[in-house]
Amino acid sequence: MNRIGTLLRKEKISIITCYDATFSNLLERCKCDAALVGDSLGIVVKGEKNTRKVTIDEIIYHTRAVRLGSSNLPIIADMPLSALKTKNEALLNARALINAGADMIKIEGGTSMLAIVKFLSENKIKICAHIGYIPQTMNKPSTKVDSEKSLKIAKALEDNGAQMIVLSMMGNKTDKLLTKNLSIPTIAFRSSNLCSGNVEIIYDLIGVTSKFFKVKKDKFSNKPISCMTAIIRFIESIKKTTDG
């Protein structure tokens, strides 16, 4: 089953980050396009301040759980920076994630990751690149994004085998430029509606955080919003967007 091939052909792509079988099953029933097993689990599941202590074994564990919840949902799994020390180590860890149920591996970083991206791609690992705000190495998002430089980086990642790219907090101008000039899907994270799709974290969609446990209210009824309602509204909002 070529789940990623089908995903990459979609005009508008909805991706939701989740970490367990229950939520992945719900995403599939709501017809979400893909699940991301993100290293954000370090914050929202483990309660840490950032994603930097997340290990490859933890991503493998959660990837396996997400796959057990869904047989058809394409799964993208984050690769921790600590799992990318050498090309061979990266390949070993990527294959472990694939064996756990992932269809694609997401790697944060620009030009410093070109050799890894190329090597994994040559070894038949499907890669989703990730540029802009990269929390594995950055403390906070950049206040000024160089759109032309970002385009060069994104093109280099595409040329070296990336089949999808996350544009994290890069803004309307950069999102639009990269989406127009790349042949691979672009996925916005907290940025714009000008990409090929968007990704969100399940706990943010339903209004629950690891620190405050806020309950998101339905703006129409002022009652707590259900998980399914939040997911469906997110997916529908992406399908309704048009290129700007």
Image: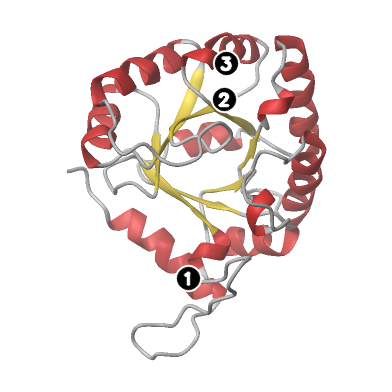
Q: What kind of residue is marked 1?
A: Ala
Q: Residue furthest left?
A: 244
Tell me whether circle 2 and circle 3 mark residues in contact (CB < 8 Å). yes
Q: Quadrant of the N terminus?
A: top right
Where does residue 89 sit, x and y in percent of width and height? Answer: 77, 16
Which of 219/64 is in front?
A: 219
Disc sitting over residue 117 in the figure: 3
Q: CA distance from mark 2 to mark 1?
A: 28 Å
Tell me whether circle 1 and circle 3 mark residues in contact (CB < 8 Å). no
Q: Which residue is located at x 62 percent, y 46 percent?
A: 50
Q: Dot 1 lies on which element?
A: helix
Q: CA distance from mark 2 to mark 3?
A: 7 Å
Where does residue 14 sit, x and y in percent of width and height? Answer: 45, 50
Where does residue 143 sit, x and y in percent of width and height? Answer: 31, 39
Which of 167/121 is in front?
A: 167
Q: Is residue 223 left or right of residue 27?
A: left
Q: What kind of residue is marked 3?
A: Val
**Residue position marked by numbered label 2 in the rendering:** 127
